[in-house]
Amino acid sequence: MHQSVDIEVARWCAEHRNGTVTDVFRFLEDVGESTAFFVVAGIVAVILVLAFRLRTGLARILVAMAVTATATGPLKEWIDRPRPPYDLAITHLSGPAMPSSHAILTSSIVAALVLAPWWTSPRLRLAVGVLGAAGCLLSGAAMIYLGGHWLSDVLVGWALGAAITGGMMLLLKRAGLT
């Protein structure tokens, strides 16, 4: 993506911020970065797996997401892209910007859920995909709006999260990991 698009989007966000949207997006940022969120999400996942006997494909999902999460740090260091400047940001994150960890995480979760083998209803799988995509869009919009990431950081994060997780799940399925 041409850098001027990133700059124009960041400027537009900086010029059009308002209190309510800022508060909602800061809340989403805080939730997405809290350890408590990941602990609660893990507990909910275990309960769902046990309650609905969703063990088929669970190892595949966990391995695929672990590979995706592990790849994020080295990718950021290798690309080493700076974050938006302070005058365009109201959140200040540390480290390189690309790819967005938030975007990789959200798209990885959605890819894993949509590709999970336990769906018996195509409509339910589609609903999960649509709701997940909406969550990805909201999370990505928050990071761009707050100035924590450039638009292209988020777009690349979404693509990598979905591609790495999806690719790993397919490879693991072919290898026989259930």
Image: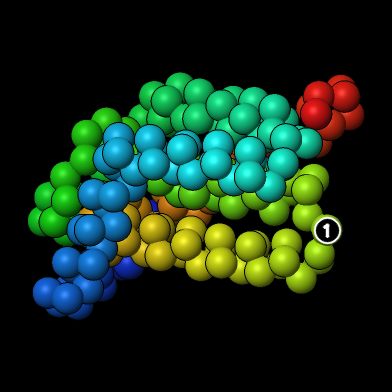
Can you see residue 101? no
Residue 126 in the image: x percent, y percent?
71, 67
Quadrant of res 20? bottom left
The answer to whether 13 appears left or right of 152 in the picture is: left
Task: Indicate whether 42 appears above or below 15.
Answer: above
Residue 121 in the image: x percent, y percent?
81, 64
**The residue positioned farthest toward the front in the image shown:** 51
Residue 105 in the image: x percent, y percent?
48, 42
Q: Nearer the viewer, residue 71 or 14?
A: 71
Q: Residue at x 49, y 44 (%)?
A: 44
The answer to whether 58 appears left or right of 176 in the picture is: left
The answer to whether 91 appears left or right of 45 in the picture is: left
* Residue at which label 1 appears: 120
Can you see residue 21? yes
Task: Indicate whether 110 appears above or below 93.
Answer: below
Amino acid type of the residue that numbered disc 1 sits on in the rendered structure: Thr
Q: Residue at x 30, y 35 (%)?
A: 35
Residue 162 in the image: x percent, y percent?
62, 46
Quadrant of res 73? top left
Q: Residue at x 59, y 33 (%)?
A: 65
Q: Nearer the viewer, residue 53 or 91?
A: 53
Q: Residue at x 51, y 67 (%)?
A: 134
